[in-house]
Image (spheres, rainbow, N blue to C red):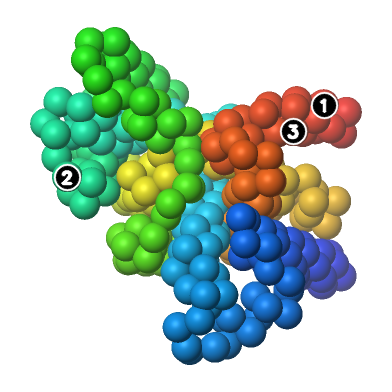
């Protein structure tokens, strides 16, 4: 067992370093690429320079907020995906299936197209909408003691309802829907420090809380008889950890729009990388932080490529995430 733990620790450390390097490289390219191309030395100098030069303004005020937002969004989605998969005991569980993305999207579309609210109010409105949709999901499934199957069914039903409502608002809108269509694809364009300041007070505590409850998540993945034998209040913990996932997801959707597949794929990439070392189920003390790091690296890389080819990052994540998911299913099926 000691040898297995040592091997797992080494592989986990290697994966964490790889994700950090990948995210750093993608961020550096994102800071250098644009209408004004900057060499890596110029980027580093602009980050160090506190003056008001053109390079410093371009890097620190125009490009760095987008890069930081990408990292925060990816980390939040990776962590939220792990939480949802664990509390529902479903390896295909995603934050989208909790109705959060649809609720946040509906709130922003409603505020933008119908209520005509100013852009500054749309971010907190989207976060509140996603949180309300998540609470509604838990309320619907509460009578079943938050049974994992019914929890997902409730989330899917609520998500379908809100997506239908969004479609209704879009098709009946007279003008001004083009911008919201672009946002609904998942985009990090024109993100500022205001978006970062709205995001990190929710994401950072959510990441910390998720990792703090790693041992509880290990128990929640066990069968009902085992959790009852150890006296774990399953319903209460599913609610608490589900709300953490809801907050993480709602904040990211409010800032960047619905970005799919990251919450689904990131935990599976970690499991696949550490499968041989873990032997059985991967402990959440490794799975949670590594999923957050993997999600951050994936979104940072996707946004870097999105900048190069000129498409929204959400579309790129779907285009890359679909084949990657098929590959993961085939690899896991072959291992089984």
Residue at the image position 48 percent from the left and 41 percent from the top: 187
Separation (CA) of disc 2 from disc 1: 47 Å
Name the residue beneath numbered marker 1: 330
State the SS at label 3.
Answer: helix
In the rendered image, is residue 46 in sight? Answer: yes
Quadrant containing the N terminus is: bottom right
Judge depth for marks 1 and 3 and give the one in front: 3
> Helix, strand, or loop for circle 2?
loop
- Which picture quadrant has residue 212? bottom left
The residue to which callout 3 is attached is: 324
Which residue appears at 35% of the width and 58% of the height? 195
CB atoms at circles 2 and 1 under 8 Å apart?
Answer: no
Q: Nearer the viewer, residue 232 or 122?
A: 122
> How many angstroms separate mark 3 from mark 2 (CA)?
38 Å
222, 109: nearer the viewer: 109
Q: Residue furthest left?
A: 115
Looking at the rendered image, the disc whose residue lies closer to the viewer, 3 or 2, is 2
Q: Are marks 3 and 2 in contact (CB under 8 Å)?
A: no
* Badge 1 density bin: few <14, some 14–19, many ≥20, Cα 10 Å: few
- Residue 113 falls left or right of residue 197: left
Q: Is residue 225 visible?
A: no
The residue tagged 2 is: 118
């Amino acid at each position: 067992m000691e040898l297995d733990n040592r091997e797992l620790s080494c592989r986990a450390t290697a994966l964490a370093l790889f994700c950090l390097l990948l995210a750093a490289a993608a961020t550096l390219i994102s800071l250098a690429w644009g209408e004004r191309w900057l060499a890596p030395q110029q980027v580093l100098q602009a980050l160090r320079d506190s003056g008001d030069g053109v390079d410093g303004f371009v890097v620190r005020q125009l490009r760095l907020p987008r890069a930081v937002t990408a990292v925060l969004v990816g980390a939040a989605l990776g962590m939220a995906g792990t939480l949802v998969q664990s509390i529902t005991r479903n390896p295909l569980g995603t934050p989208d299936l909790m109705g959060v993305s649809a609720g946040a999207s509906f709130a922003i579309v409603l505020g933008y197209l119908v209520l005509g609210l100013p852009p500054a109010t749309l971010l907190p409105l989207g976060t509140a909408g996603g949180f309300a949709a998540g609470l509604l999901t838990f309320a619907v499934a509460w009578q079943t003691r938050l049974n994992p199957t019914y929890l997902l069914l409730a989330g899917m039903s609520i998500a379908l309802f809100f997506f239908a409502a969004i479609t209704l608002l879009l098709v009946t809108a007279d003008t001004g829907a083009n911008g919201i269509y672009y946002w609904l694809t998942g985009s990090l364009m024109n993100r500022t420090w205001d978006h970062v300041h709205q995001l990190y007070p929710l994401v950072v505590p959510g990441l910390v809380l998720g990792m703090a409850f790693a041992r509880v998540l290990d128990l929640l993945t066990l069968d009902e008889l085992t959790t009852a034998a150890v006296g774990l209040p399953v319903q209460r913990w599913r609610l608490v950890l589900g709300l953490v996932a809801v907050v993480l997801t709602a904040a990211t959707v409010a800032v960047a729009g619905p970005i799919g597949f990251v919450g689904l794929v990131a935990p599976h990439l970690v499991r696949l990388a550490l499968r041989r070392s873990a032997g059985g189920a991967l402990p959440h003390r490794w799975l949670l932080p590594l999923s957050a790091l993997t999600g951050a690296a994936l979104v940072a890389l996707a946004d870097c490529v999105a900048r190069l080819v000129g498409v929204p990052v959400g579309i790129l994540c779907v285009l890359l995430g679909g084949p990657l998911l098929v590959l993961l299913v085939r690899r896991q099926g072959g291992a089984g």
